[in-house]
Amino acid sequence: MTLHDLFNNVSSNYWPVALYFILLPGIAWIVGQVATGSRDVKFWGLVYSVLVYAVCIPGIFAVTLNIYLFLFERQSVWQANIILQFLPIISMALTLMIIKQKIPFSLVPGFGKLSGFLTLIAALIGVMWFFDRLHLVAFTYVPFAYIIVGFVGTLLLIRFAWSKMF
């Protein structure tokens, strides 16, 4: 089974996937209401950690897939699958905003690993796009040290932007 086959299969029966991504922000809100006033921050941090991973892994995949499809495959926005390409990202953003209102992300175990993973993916896609757009001839006049400094600077900029966003 290819990824295209999986998308076609899910597109023909999209309600389970749609329900999953619609319920996750609702579950985060319910957990926030139940956890209000509780002193057991470690337990609720673990519960939020499960929610973060449940929403961020598909959300990060959807972001990466969209970037790949729009930059490299030149897919039109009109052909995008709303359930598989946009709903996970919207669900991820809503869930993270709801969780951020109740508990700092520093108390959610493993959240730093996800943001680091997203930074790495963004940097690699940026480098792939850079190599896709430029010809190798353009590198003859640019010292390699400048390319490394630009790559590290991009990593730091993406990491800084991600920390300010959430």
Image (cartoon, rainbow, N blue to C red):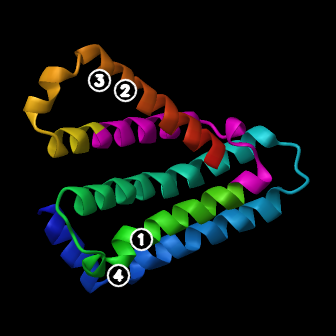
Q: Quadrant of the N terminus?
A: bottom left
From mark 2 to mark 1, how far is it between C-alphas?
A: 30 Å
Q: Distance of mark 3 from mark 4, alpha carbons? A: 44 Å
Q: Which residue is mark 1?
A: 86
- Looking at the image, residue 10 lies above or below residue 27: below
1 or 64: nearer the viewer: 64
Q: Which residues are magenta?
A: 100-126
Type of amino acid under label 3: Ile
Mark sitting earlier along the chain (4/1)? 4
Q: Which residue is mark 4?
A: 14
- Spatial CA distance of label 1 from label 3 is 33 Å
Give the dominant element type of the magenta stretch: helix, strand or loop: helix
Q: Earlier in the sequence, mark 2 or mark 4?
A: 4
Q: Mark 1 or mark 2, which is nearer the start of the sequence?
A: 1
User: Which residue is labeled 3 in the image?
Assistant: 147
Q: CA distance from mark 3 to mark 2?
A: 5 Å
On the rendered structure, is 138 left or right of 80?
A: left
Can you say whether 24 is above or below 109 in the image?
Answer: below
The location of residue 9, given as percent across then percent down, is: 21, 77
Residue 5, picture quadrant: bottom left
Q: Are marks 3 and 2 in contact (CB under 8 Å)?
A: yes
Q: Earlier in the sequence, mark 1 or mark 3?
A: 1
Q: Position of residue 101 (x, y in %)?
A: 77, 55
Q: Which residue is mark 2?
A: 150
